[in-house]
């Protein structure tokens, strides 16, 4: 979760690199000044419809980053005072709260504990779902860290630049504790379909391509499997007009599957 419009210089450069020209610059400036007046105008604030109560998935999880310690963490400190409201909205719609460690926290127990305790203080209950940066995951150590803090379900193992069954299955399975040579108590829920993998890597920022890939994947994998979807609020950036169709496709996806 990130507060996009308050990072104006970065947003302006991004708009130019994406080829949106002067109209794109003017659009992001309008969002910027609106966001200063009301944070719900932030282009990344889509939680009012992103959290859907009327779907019947096996699990609905929202993973929150709770700290920023590197340039790789899409997190803005200004959003911290909004977390209680957003978490409350998620829970009202039947979502469980998960923890997404910041870039260094997966291998730094001090940071890990600090962020987790902060998130749990807002959540008001123990968090059992976790998802980490895959490239920061040490197969011999990270799962033990997760177990120590009583995590039950991990959804880290997927691909950054493609979709599909990286673990050879979409169904949950127990990880292996290589350090102690035994079955881990941590159950892996493989990540199968991540929006950014399709949108940025496979489709090179083309919304129509995204929709085609999504429907093709679902058509080919609609029987006898388990699919974990991961959608980021930043994917539905309201300041970019060409992404408007992604909202309707997301809602249609929820309706069709649910």
Image: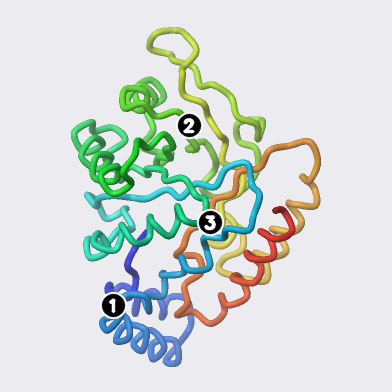
Question: Mark 2 touching mark 1, by CB under 8 A?
Answer: no
How far apart are labels 3 and 2 at the CA level? 18 Å
Identified at 38% across, 55% down, the residue is 87
- Residue 113 lies, with reference to residue 45, above or below; the image says above
Identified at 72% across, 53% down, the residue is 257
Can you identify the residue that label 2 sits on? Answer: 153
How far apart are labels 3 and 1 at the CA level? 24 Å
Can you identify the residue that label 1 sits on? Answer: 8
- What is the secondary structure assignment of the residue under circle 3? loop
Q: Nearer the viewer, mark 3 or mark 2?
A: 2
Can you identify the residue that label 3 sits on? Answer: 231
The N terminus lies in quadrant: bottom left
Q: Nearer the viewer, mark 2 or mark 1?
A: 2
Quarter of the image for residue 147 reads top left
- Residue 156 lies, with reference to residue 19, above or below; the image says above
Horizontal side, residue 170 vs residue 121: left or right: right
Q: Position of residue 226 (x, y in %)?
A: 68, 38
Q: Position of residue 84 (x, y in %)?
A: 31, 57
Q: Earlier in the sequence, mark 2 or mark 1?
A: 1
Q: Position of residue 189 (x, y in %)?
A: 56, 34
- What is the secondary structure assignment of the residue under circle 2? strand
- What is the secondary structure assignment of the residue under circle 1? helix
Question: Mark 3 touching mark 1, by CB under 8 A?
Answer: no
Q: Nearer the viewer, residue 47 or 19?
A: 47
């Amino acid at each position: 979760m990130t507060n996009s419009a308050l990072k104006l210089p970065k947003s302006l450069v991004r708009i130019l690199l994406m080829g949106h020209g002067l109209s794109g610059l003017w659009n992001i400036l309008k969002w910027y000044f609106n966001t200063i007046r009301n944070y719900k105008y932030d282009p990344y604030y889509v939680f009012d419809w992103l959290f859907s109560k009327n779907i019947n998935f096996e699990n609905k999880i929202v993973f929150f980053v709770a700290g920023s310690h590197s340039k790789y963490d899409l997190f803005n400190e200004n959003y911290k005072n909004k977390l209680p409201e957003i978490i409350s909205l998620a829970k009202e719609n039947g979502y469980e709260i998960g923890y997404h460690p910041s870039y260094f926290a997966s291998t730094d127990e001090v940071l890990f504990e600090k962020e987790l305790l902060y998130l749990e203080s807002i959540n008001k209950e123990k968090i059992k779902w976790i998802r980490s940066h895959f490239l920061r995951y040490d197969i011999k150590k990270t799962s033990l860290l997760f177990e120590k803090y009583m995590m039950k379900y991990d959804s880290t193992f997927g691909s950054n630049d493609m979709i599909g069954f990286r673990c050879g299955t979409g169904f949950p399975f127990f990880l292996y504790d290589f350090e102690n040579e035994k079955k881990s108590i941590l159950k892996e829920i493989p990540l199968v379909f991540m929006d950014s993998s399709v949108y940025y890597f496979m489709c090179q920022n083309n919304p129509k391509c995204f929709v085609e890939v999504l429907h093709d994947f679902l058509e080919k994998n609609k029987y006898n499997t388990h699919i974990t979807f991961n959608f980021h609020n930043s994917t539905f950036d309201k300041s970019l007009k060409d992404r408007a169709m992604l909202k309707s496709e997301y809602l249609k996806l929820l309706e069709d599957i649910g």
